[in-house]
Image (cartoon, grey):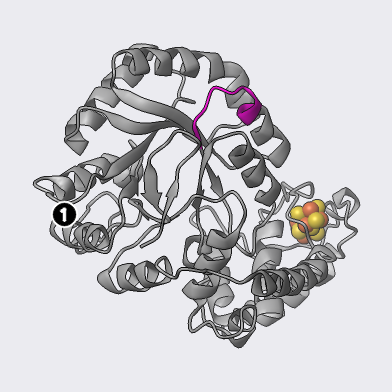
Amino acid sequence: MLYRRYGKDGPLVSVLGFGAMRLPLRAGGDYGRVNYTRATEVIRRALHAGVNFIDTHHRYHEGHSEEAVGRALKGWKGPRVYLQTKTPFYDDKPAAHFERMLYEALEKLGVAQIDYLLFHSVRMDRWKKRGRRFLKFSDWALRKGLIVRRGFSSHDTPENVKTYIDTGAFSAALMSYNWLNRRMADTIAYAADRGMGVSVMNPLGGGSLAAATPKILGLLPGARSAPEVALRYVLATPGVTVAFSGMSDLAQVDENARLASRPQGMTPAQWKAMNVRLAAIERKGLAVCTSCGYCMPCPHGVSIPVNFMLYNRARFLDMTEWAGERFEALRKHAEGDRSALACRKCGACLPKCPARVPIVRQLERTAAMLTRR
Ligand code: SF4
Ligand code: SF4
């Protein structure tokens, strides 16, 4: 396992982190019913492979993730494990509510201190409303010694994330990033240049980049699997300290740990060549849809950018099976059909699209390509 320093004054952490949001579940597959025995096996396997950093959240697995991590760590005699958890500080609740949550987290995790407490999913509206209060709350937790450092996680725009970084108040940031979603690349480097530890969530696109299509494997010649392409790319990105992978079984742990132990993830020539290939894919994709969402909402319920994301992955990456499954799920959405098939061709979306995507025609093509017969 390789290790990197998490920020200028942070600990040495494994480049592969354990994301405790896709733990094994009990029969029935209910997200809140973690199979603690299997979760312990999977987490322990990662620890034995050298992983020493775990990311969780007060609410992952409906509040049971922290407990699962705590159970796995109970009696652990190996090297020190660092813990990062997140608090839903956007909830409009008084400080006492979050104090209670923090004490509960400490108890569930079985530790006296949390290494990193993150303001979960910061956005500008949340920041304006709750940012100062979070800093005050985390100052209190720091003074009490309940947390060691604070940070934030965010899916916000690169510009807004830089605003949070520029406060200088945070030691760590968690951002979504992978080879198909590179918009945070500059922001990651920006944070690292300012001494922050940067962790990445969704390095495999939540599993969507795990399909070993020839096009995906062709992005990094020599790679033996799609997770290899994804992890090596993320870990080679300037500024990234650690990639948190949500691992559910022992095979995933073994594969990821093997990849995170390669002394050199990518050579400069491989890095350059893969970026050229990605830019070519993005050029084709961007000509169609940038997922800006300006065309939404559709009065007939079509999730336009999601349909085009699936269409583009099927077209450009040969992920037809993966996209077809998700298209089917859109069709059967609990609140009504969200797929391209629900388009009534009213044209209301057309003038709103800055990329001048021929939305109606593209939706027809999407439906023709992804509808399961
Ligand atoms: S044309 Fe189709 S996708 Fe666009 S707004 Fe109308 S129903 Fe929705
Ligand atoms: S407005 Fe155009 S580019 Fe933006 S999400 Fe809709 S279709 Fe895509």
Q: Which element carries disc 1, helix, strand or loop? A: helix
For image coordinates 52% across by 27% down, the residue present is 170
- Is residue 332 visible to the viewer in this orientation of the structure? no
Q: Is residue 275 above or below residue 346?
A: below
Q: Amino acid at mark 1?
A: Tyr
Query: How far across and how far down the image is residue 245, in percent?
Result: 41, 58
Query: How far across and how far down the image is residue 39, in percent?
Result: 21, 58
For image coordinates 76% across by 66% down, the residue present is 282
- Is residue 203 visible to the viewer in this orientation of the structure? yes
Question: Mark 1 = which residue?
Answer: 36
Q: Quadrant of the N terminus?
A: bottom left
Q: Nearer the viewer, residue 366 or 69?
A: 69
Give the image quadrant in which the ligand numbered 1 is located: bottom right
* Segment tinted magenta in the rendering: 164-172
Magenta stretch: residue 282 in it? Answer: no
Quadrant housing residue 290? bottom right
Instruction: State left or right for residue 60 relative to residue 34.
Output: right
Magenta stretch: residue 170 in it? Answer: yes
Query: How far across and how far down the image is residue 81, in percent?
Result: 26, 45
For image coordinates 51% across by 77% down, the residue present is 226
Q: Nearer the viewer, residue 24 or 17?
A: 17
Q: Nearer the viewer, residue 46 or 134?
A: 46
For image coordinates 55% across by 19% down, the residue present is 131
Query: How far across and how far down the image is residue 336, in percent?
Result: 56, 57
At label 1, counting other C-alpha atoms closer than 10 Å, the crowd grade (few under 14, some 14-19, many 20 or more) is many
